[in-house]
Image (cartoon, grey):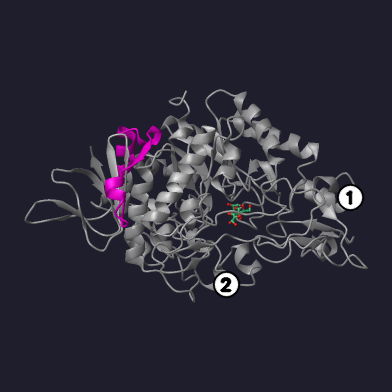
Amino acid sequence: DAAREWWRSAVIYQVYPRSFADSTGNGIGDIPGITSRLEHLTTLGVDAIWLSPFYRSPQADAGYDVADYRDVDPIFGTLSDFETLLERAHDVGLRVIVDLVPNHTSDDHDWFKAALAAGPDSPERARYLFREGQGENGDLPPNNWKSIFGGPAWTRVNERAAAATDGVTDSQWYLHMFDTTQPDLDWEHPEVRAEFEDVLRFWLDRGVDGFRIDVAHGMVKTPGLPDWDGEVSMVEGTTDEAHQPAEDGSTGAGNSGPMFDQEGVHEIYRAWHTVLAGYDGDRALVAEAWVEPLSRLARYVRSDEMHQAFNFSFLTTAWDAAALRSVVAASLRASDEVGAPTTWVLSNHDVVRHASRMGLSGGAVRPNGIGKTDPQPDAALGLRRARAATLQMLGLPGSAYVYQGEELGLPEHTDLDDDLRQDPAWWRSGYTEAGRDGCRVPLPWEADAPGYGFGPTGATWLPQPETYRASAADVQRSTDGSTFAMYRDALALRKEHDLGLGSLAWVDEVAASPNVLAFVNRDVLVLTSFAAEPFALPAGSQVLISSGPLVADGASGAVQVPQDTTVWVQL
Ligand code: TEU
């Protein structure tokens, strides 16, 4: 029953706890901070929130390194703070999805500490991927895999940074597809499977509405861990308008190799589907799986597996009518085939904020950060295109994700001091990548308060750029035509016209123009103009909302849609 399955059309707002709102004054956001700002989200009109990890963690990868899956890290509050947040969110009609990180634990997890202490060939080591090295003395890694953050994917036990303090001296190696502090689990091990089913139940029993599954395409590896010579790194996007998606809709948003998208992962998700189905209230699993082509991604959302998968196509597609049309069509086709909703994503905590990404011109863009020595984005162009892209996205059928701050028009912070950067992707790359800190800067709530009102003392764990003033929530909320106003009004219209459960029909006579993209969803025409020449709407068109100012043609009275603008027109 589609009406009951809220996740088919939901707009889901990503909260990155460390940067949303601080209640204590230590400069780090926390759970009571989130609870205190729920009204922002209900005013905006989203249906659900997804919380990035808040579990006990050394924070080597901002909480994606979990030491205890059943507890809240003291920097974010307590389990009881979480229960309060969940209750308040439910009271105001917001669903809550939490993040589950099953590919790896933190090296501070009890299992990993026990594995180190127990030594080679112990049952404790069998939950992870420990192997002997190659070469005469085993001093070459077991295979040639690279970490996604850069450098080898293997660390030798006695060469661990912490070897001196953990007192372990044997010479085995362990696999980590991310940081050295994030050892990969062995998902062939029955205890690993049992443990995560139990963790699901722990949070389901507390009433969460679902889970976002981190690196959902990575848990199962090809047996024997064969060498792999392909690329294993953060994906590349493009701002090159000449670059078109492949026939099958691929845009470069996929990882491949013996460590990704193995057949065996699907068995895990079928088991989890059954766990969720044992609970009332329509709980959902969302796959974070960087898999291409889209028909391959769709296998994660077959009817007995997960409910949604992030569709990252927009992150790696240029701002170009033809390219966007083909990824939208491919996305809908792939998910329709398995009866799952399509999802849309323009920003998240791993990629350059779209208000900045879309202000870059002509070429490859590494999603993981813009450094101060890189070509800098054109802020005005970026915001204009970001608004047009957002209004286009919100007009599409399916479920859409909004990353905290995009509703304020926040740009990427491209000028962070190197010694303030905290993302392991930055230092593991050998300082060649800027890393993801620039999209994780604490939110500005009040233009005139210290730290733009992030917390009670003005402290912020990363400095906020001056440009955040104009993006402060209080300014945005009280300014006509602001980015916040556009999101709020679009979300209300989306609901009123039930666009999330609608369907798309291209309007070919308009879309035939290479510089206009137009489709109908229910009784709304969604039209984006990419052309330098303004596009004249038919006389009498009733514009419901626009991503930027429109021009009235003095003589005919016809409404003109300027370049890089999206409008919704009532049919
Ligand atoms: O991200 C997985 C990850 O690294 C991808 O986002 C990566 O960019 C992709 O494989 C494209 O090549 C998740 C989290 O979102 C991220 O914050 C964590 O650092 C990572 O997992 C490790 O847990």
From this viewpoint, which residue is outermost toward the left?
Answer: 555
User: Could you tell me residue 543's position as x and y percent?
Assistant: 21, 44
Mark 2 is on which residue type? Asp
User: Could you tell me residue 531's position as x and y percent?
Assistant: 28, 60
- Residue at image mark 1: 118
- Specify the quadrant of the image occupied by residue 376: bottom left
Mark pair 2, 1: CA separation:
37 Å
Left or right: 391 as drawn, with respect to 557: right
Magenta-span inclusion, residue 502: yes
Q: 358 and 560: which one is in front?
A: 560
Q: Secondary structure at mark 2?
A: helix
Q: Compared to 8, does 309 lie above or below?
A: below
Left or right: 344 as drawn, with respect to 103: left
Sequence order check, earlier mark of 2 and 1: 1
Q: Which mark is residue 419?
A: 2
Marks 2/1 in contact by CB < 8 Å: the verdict is no
Q: 259 and 64: which one is in front?
A: 259
Q: Secondary structure at mark 1?
A: helix
Q: 119 and 264: which one is in front?
A: 264
Mark 1 is on which residue type? Ala
Find the magenta span and give its range: 490-517
